[in-house]
Image (cartoon, rainbow, N blue to C red):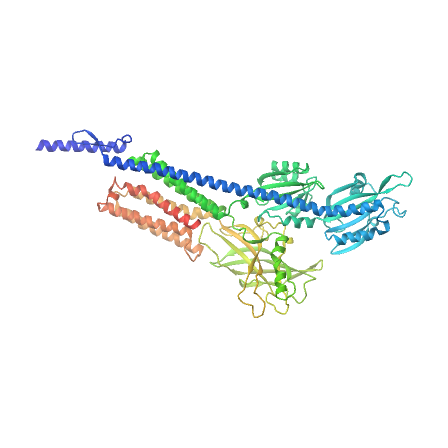
């Protein structure tokens, strides 16, 4: 019996050693083996079936997830490409349409001048009838700045010079004489328009600032002739010229459908900016080649070279105004050699942010599943090797971190001002939104609305509470002669509290009263911090006219944005804000005027008031949270706590109570950090970052519970298997999966 017992012990020890070796170096696939008492090796059929089932399922699921990820990526790419192509085609169509409209307007100018020249040449129009015809033409064409004639010396009634013209200035039309101030027959640069027309029959001059009207104008000049009685040949008798205001062309370009940040511009045949959102380009006669040199962009220079050659072209580049990837499209105007250009922001042409987020999240989930099942096959984790299981767990955890980072990146790059907003970027948009107000006035039997240009300039802004922001700055209004004195001057900030408004400064220019106020006070608004630290908030000034509910006027008073008082009105350029604007823990994304149509549920005591959509003027500033500082201050410490917690778990085999004590210390640290976050954010509900704290709390408790179970040697296979291997393997995948699910639920 004793020998038999010794033999049994030897065989048992060999079994243990053999199984230990097989844990380190598993057998080849399909040969799951165990050692027996007689030193033979047999296959465990049941275990082999389980491993084969895991392998087959992983293979099938890997294939399915690969198909879903591939199809999802293809579908997403196709949709995005189609949207981009559609936007590019739309931008081209808008450019061609606008170029034809501009040519149509310029042909009016050309037609008027050509008609007078032809009639003078043919004798249908007598010299003494010329001024009457000039007056008729300028009255018929409201956008003409001037139209006139310049006779050759001694052609008109033996007078040496005769050059009458009708000009429009400050809304009035007046007859003038060029020869009174300028001898246009002298060969000096300012008289090139005259000599060029005599030499070339007709000519479109380069746009210039007109001294009479002080406006940038388009100048068309055409020659008229007389028959020489001696030679019986036609000889140049003078020049007919017509001037057109560039402002009408700018208003026409403002109607282009180019998104919220797109814009148009005009180039002369020499590449000089005739119209551009940055007025300095036009005032300084900057060329597109100057812009290419300043921005060091070869593609802009190439586009300019094609433009002056009269070629259509498109380039993709980094826009100098918005800093975004953009298209620049140029379409020639064959009539006079100009080119119309448009800039379209590519980001605005892609799918909306919600769709982008959701498609990206789904793609990453499919990719995570594919790589997870692929790693099971690649590392042969179905065999149960410890190294293979750790490799799969690490791979899955890295994918979860990458997915969370991708969703964060989308949230950080998301554009906060939507296409659904009534953002006011030009006069055409304002006019279109206010067009229904005349019909509403007729329905209410009121006089047409009064429109008061209003501007805003913010000097400082500070968040002071959950629903409060302290603002300082200026508001100004312009009252022209058409606004009755009975209309109260001023404005109301209906959402302000403790507001202080100074007495107005008054300036009078061009029959317009400019009133300017300095204000400071607290604005109450409903801010949303639920996505902290990836949140953004609108801070707005809601502006009412003082006579918003005045009944005796029998008309509506509406505030309109004074767009002409800003160098650039593009939202990304942040108009109306102090250049060195300082905000604590926030970045300014954009600022703009917008209308919000309000329908009041009261008539304010007067019949007919407040029953229709009333356009309230808002000046909106959009702030985005500065993420980097918060990441370092909050996410990094939580990551360190999670790493230390895992390190303690690895050493928890025989130190259960020490682990519990360490977990208790971690909980207090995390609680104090969460309290600090709540005090800084002052949010009313649960914010996104707090879910990270909740996850850490939960896993601290799990680690403590795991340590207690190990200490008391509870017979739980999940804990006891291979020295607490399963909880260790599931720590990072479980924690990161929890955080990924929370991130998806918040940002999906």
Q: Is residue 564 left or right of residue 639?
A: right
Q: How many marks?
A: 0
Q: Out of 230 and 11, give the one closest to the viewer.
A: 230
Residue 319 on image: x %, y %: 58, 42
Q: Out of 593 and 156, give the one closest to the viewer.
A: 156
Q: Is residue 420 left or right of residue 449?
A: left
Q: Is residue 46 left or right of residue 181?
A: left
- Is 19 above or below relative to 476? above
Q: Out of 558 and 312, give the one closest to the viewer.
A: 312
Image quarter in which the N terminus is found: top left
Q: Taking the image as drawn, is residue 534 in sight?
A: yes
Residue 407 on image: x %, y %: 44, 45
- Is 212 above or below relative to 729? below
Residue 177 on image: x %, y %: 82, 51
Residue 260 on image: x %, y %: 57, 49
Identity of the residue furthest to the right in this view: 230
Q: Quadrant of residue 726?
A: top left
Q: Quadrant of residue 386?
A: top left
Q: Out of 299 and 375, give the one closest to the viewer.
A: 375
Q: Taking the image as drawn, is residue 384 in sight?
A: no
């Amino acid at each position: 019996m004793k020998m038999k017992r010794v033999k049994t012990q030897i065989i048992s020890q060999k079994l243990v050693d053999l199984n230990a070796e097989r844990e380190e170096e598993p057998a080849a696939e399909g040969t799951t083996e165990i050692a027996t008492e007689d030193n033979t090796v047999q296959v465990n059929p049941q275990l082999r079936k389980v491993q084969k089932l895991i392998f087959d399922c992983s293979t099938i699921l890997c294939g399915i997830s690969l198909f879903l990820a591939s199809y999802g990526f293809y579908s997403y790419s196709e949709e995005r490409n189609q949207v981009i192509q559609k936007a590019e085609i739309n931008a081209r169509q808008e450019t061609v349409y606008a170029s034809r409209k501009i040519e149509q307007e310029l042909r009016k100018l050309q037609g008027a001048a050509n008609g007078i020249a032809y009639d003078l040449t043919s004798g249908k129009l007598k010299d003494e009838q010329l001024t009457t015809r000039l007056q008729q033409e300028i009255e018929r064409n409201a956008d003409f700045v001037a139209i006139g004639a310049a006779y050759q010396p001694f052609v008109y009634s033996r007078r040496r010079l005769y050059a009458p013209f009708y000009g429009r200035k400050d809304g009035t039309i007046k007859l003038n004489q060029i020869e009174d101030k300028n001898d246009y027959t002298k060969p000096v640069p300012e008289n090139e328009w005259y000599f060029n027309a005599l030499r070339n029959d007709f000519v479109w001059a380069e746009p210039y600032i007109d001294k009479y009207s002080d406006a940038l104008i388009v100048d068309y000049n055409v020659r008229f002739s007389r028959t020489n009685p001696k030679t019986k040949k036609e000889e140049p008798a003078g020049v007919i010229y017509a001037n057109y205001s560039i402002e009408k062309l700018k208003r026409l370009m403002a109607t282009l459908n180019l998104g919220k940040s797109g814009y148009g511009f005009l180039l002369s045949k020499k590449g000089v900016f005739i119209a551009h959102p940055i007025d300095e380009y036009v005032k300084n006669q900057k060329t597109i080649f100057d812009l290419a040199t300043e921005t060091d962009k070869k593609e802009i220079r190439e586009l300019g070279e094609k433009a002056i050659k009269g070629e259509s072209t498109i380039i993709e580049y980094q826009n100098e105004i918005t800093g975004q990837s953009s298209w620049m499209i140029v379409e020639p105007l064959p009539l006079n050699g100009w080119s119309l250009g448009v800039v379209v922001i590519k980001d605005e042409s892609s799918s909306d942010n919600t769709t982008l987020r959701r498609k990206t999240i789904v793609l990453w989930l499919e990719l995570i599943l594919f790589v997870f099942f692929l790693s099971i096959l690649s590392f042969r984790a179905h065999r149960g090797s410890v190294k293979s299981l750790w490799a799969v767990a690490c791979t899955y955890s890295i994918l979860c971190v990458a997915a969370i980072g991708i969703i964060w990146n989308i949230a950080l790059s998301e554009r906060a001002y939507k296409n659904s907003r009534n953002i006011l970027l030009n006069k055409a948009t304002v006019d279109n939104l206010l067009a229904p107000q005349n019909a509403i006035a007729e329905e209410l039997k009121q006089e047409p609305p009064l429109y008061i240009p209003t501007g805003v300039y913010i000097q400082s802004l500070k968040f002071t509470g959950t629903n409060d922001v302290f603002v300082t700055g200026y508001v100004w209004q312009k009252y022209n002669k058409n606004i009755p004195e009975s209309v109260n001057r001023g404005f109301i900030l209906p959402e302000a509290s403790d507001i202080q408004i100074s007495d107005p400064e008054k300036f009078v220019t061009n029959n317009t009263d400019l009133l300017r106020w300095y204000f400071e006070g607290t604005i109450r608004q409903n801010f949303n911090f639920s996505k902290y630290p990836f949140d953004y908030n609108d801070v707005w000034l809601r502006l009412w006219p003082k006579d918003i509910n005045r009944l005796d006027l029998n008309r509506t008073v509406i505030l309109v944005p004074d767009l002409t008082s800003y160098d650039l009105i593009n939202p990304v350029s942040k108009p109306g804000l102090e250049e060195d604007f300082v905000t604590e823990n926030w970045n300014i994304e954009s600022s703009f005027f917008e209308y919000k149509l309000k329908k009041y549920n009261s008539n304010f005591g007067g019949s007919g008031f407040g029953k229709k959509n009333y356009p309230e003027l808002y000046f909106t500033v959009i702030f985005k949270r500065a993420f980097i500082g918060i990441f370092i201050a909050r996410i990094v410490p939580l990551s360190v706590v999670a790493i230390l917690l895992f390190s303690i778990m690895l050493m928890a085999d025989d130190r259960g109570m020490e682990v519990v004590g360490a977990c208790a210390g971690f909980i207090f640290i995390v609680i104090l950090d969460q309290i600090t976050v709540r005090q800084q954010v002052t949010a009313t509900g649960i914010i996104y970052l707090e879910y990270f704290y909740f996850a850490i709390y939960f896993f601290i408790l799990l680690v403590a519970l795991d340590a207690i179970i190990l200490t008391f040697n509870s017979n739980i296979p999940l804990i006891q298997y291979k020295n607490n291997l399963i909880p260790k393997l599931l720590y990072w995948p479980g924690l990161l999966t929890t955080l990924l699910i929370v991130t998806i639920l918040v940002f999906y």
